[in-house]
Image (tube, helix red, strand yellow):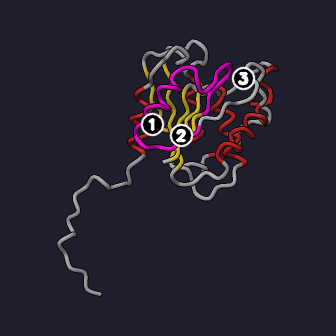
Amino acid sequence: MRIVLVHGYKASPEHNFWPWLRDELTKRGHEVIAPELPNPEEPNCQEWVKAIDASIKYPEGDTIFIAHSLGCVALLHYLEEADMSGTPKSVILVSPIYHVGAEKFASFFNPPVDFDTVMWKGQGFAVVHAKDDNVVPFDHALKYEKELQAQLFALDEGKHFVEAKELPLLLDLIDDRDSEPGESLPDDFKEIEIVL
């Protein structure tokens, strides 16, 4: 499977839980793509969208996206515009920001994300957010849950995960999405001879 990791504001693929996640996914045989987004201290959404696009080109049905914080908004704008050869298996948003009024981040929220388009650009959406997040209030996660019909994973603690060196829940979510529906069920029909 191909897994794309999208970092956030003032970060890089070498910050937070990203190095651990990249290593764990690589050990499991996944192709990991972790673009370094330009100007993380002074971000511009369109520049980030272009960097994501340049790193992956055409998402397919075996692709999972994982983004953190402001990177979630850039990822959703990328998905709005992306040409796809298949619908990505999953989009996992960690501590996503729904809206910020600061001029510095205006390119991420004006125009706003077109949720009606984005919700068709993934087979499933999940939101991971800590209730004690001291950067992005938990109600942002509730808005994403509603807008994307996402599965919400509310953790009691973890803050904004900027100090987190590991986030094992992400591996569990990927494992869940790495299997086909019904794959674990016994095949009651394998002994039946089919006559055409």
Q: Mark 3 belongs to which amino acid? A: Pro
From what the image shows, is residue 119 above or below residue 133? Answer: below
Residue beneath the point at 22% across and 58% down: 186
Please give the residue where the numbered disc 1 appears in the rendered image: 25
Task: Determine whether the residue tagged by mark 2 lies in a helix, strand or loop.
Answer: strand
From what the image shows, is residue 147 above or below residue 7? Answer: below
Say few, some or many: other residues with alpha carbon within 10 Å of mark 3 (under 14 / 14 to 19 / 20 or more): some
Residue beneath the point at 43% across and 32% down: 24
Q: Left or right: where does residue 38 sit relative to residue 11?
A: right
Say few, some or many: other residues with alpha carbon within 10 Å of mark 2 (under 14 / 14 to 19 / 20 or more): some
Please give the residue where the numbered disc 2 appears in the rendered image: 32
Q: Nearer the viewer, mark 3 or mark 1?
A: 1
- Whether residues under marks 1 and 2 lie with C-beta atoms below 8 angstroms apart, the answer is yes
Closer to the chain start, of discs 1 and 2, is 1
Q: Give x and y (percent) for residue 136.
A: 60, 19
Q: Left or right: where does residue 184 sit relative to residue 134?
A: left
From what the image shows, is residue 144 above or below residue 29? Answer: above
Label placed on residue 40: 3
Q: Mark 2 belongs to which amino acid? A: Val
Say few, some or many: other residues with alpha carbon within 10 Å of mark 1 (under 14 / 14 to 19 / 20 or more): some
Q: Give x and y (percent) for residue 181.
A: 37, 54
Q: Which residues, given as a range, are shown in magenta?
A: 6-33
Label placed on residue 5: none
Q: Is residue 163 magenta?
A: no
